[in-house]
Image (spheres, grey):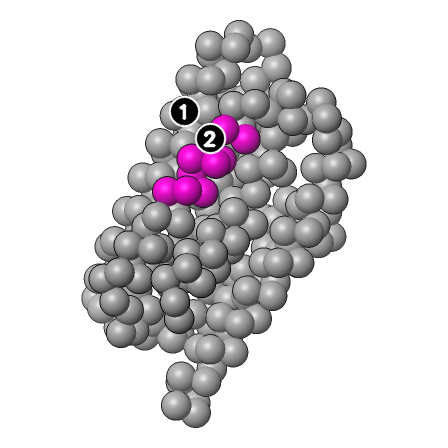
Amino acid sequence: MSLILIFVTVFAALFAIMNPIGAVPVLISLTDGYSLKERHEIIRRSIYTASGMIFGFMFLGIYIFDILGINIYDFEIAGGILLFKVGFDMLQGKLSTTKMTQIEKDESAEREAIAIAPLGTPLLAGPGSITTAIIFFNTTNITLASRFAVILAVITVLILSFFVLKYSVKIFGKLGKTGSIVISRIMGLLLTAIAVDLITTGILHIFII
């Protein structure tokens, strides 16, 4: 797989599952009444939180697998199923339960915790995005250049997510609730296709190759 293709695949998968555009209504709702400076500070902290979660698991996840005796192909299948569930929920117009629980929704009312939960995690850096980063970064026989492409794709998604959230009020005003739902469903379709590819690849390596 070429470096450009790796970058595009990882970027598309992560952007679809993190879905910062879909997070815009949540951000606006949680920061209602906040000043522009306060909202920007929360957005910045949420991106820092998401970055720490994704990169932390991306670099250390494989070692956790070794300790637990988990094969990367087993994780590809399990991760693919998880991503398919998230993508299917997005297609149905629902916020996947793998991203936010009711308890986390209730606790999000605390102003000081909004940047960390639910915005930073699990809304942006949830099980799906963490799983995607681990799988692509730790694929068997992956080269150093390919790992760099994965890192660059993750950084690009995080930067883009920051600007989407930063200008969320203007974006939401133009898109409206219906526009956000449409985009979320398109991303859900893309995510389910990537999930199917992960599942079939894992099955092929375990049972055929």
Quadrant (top left/top right/bottom left/bottom right) for the C terminus: bottom left
Mark 1, residue position: 44
Judging depth in this view, the residue of 31 and 145 nearest the camera is 145
Residue at x-position 43% and y-position 89%: 207
Q: Is residue 171 left or right of residue 45?
A: right
Res 162 label: 2
Residue at x-position 46% and y-position 30%: 162
Residue 188: image location, x then y, percent: 64, 54
Looking at the image, tell me whether mark 2 or mark 1 is earlier in sequence order: 1
CB atoms at circles 2 and 1 under 8 Å apart? yes
Judging depth in this view, the residue of 135 and 146 nearest the camera is 146
- The local secondary structure at tag 2 comes to helix
Residue at x-position 49% and y-position 70%: 198
Q: Is residue 48 above or below residue 83?
A: above
Q: Is residue 193 visible?
A: yes
Q: Is residue 45 above or below residue 127?
A: above
Residue 45: image location, x then y, percent: 39, 25
Residue at x-position 28% and y-position 54%: 148
Count of all numbered marks drawn on residues in the image:
2
Q: Which residues are magenta?
A: 155-164
Residue 26 highlighted magenta (yes or no): no
Residue 126: image location, x then y, percent: 46, 46
Q: Please, what is the three-letter code of the amino acid marked with disc 1?
A: Arg
Q: Please, what is the three-letter code of the amino acid marked with disc 2?
A: Phe
Q: Residues within 10 Å of mark 2 (few under 14, many from 20)?
A: many
Q: Is residue 23 left or right of residue 38?
A: right
Comparing labels 2 and 1, the label whose residue is closer to the camera: 2
Quadrant (top left/top right/bottom left/bottom right) for the N terminus: bottom left
Residue 162 highlighted magenta (yes or no): yes
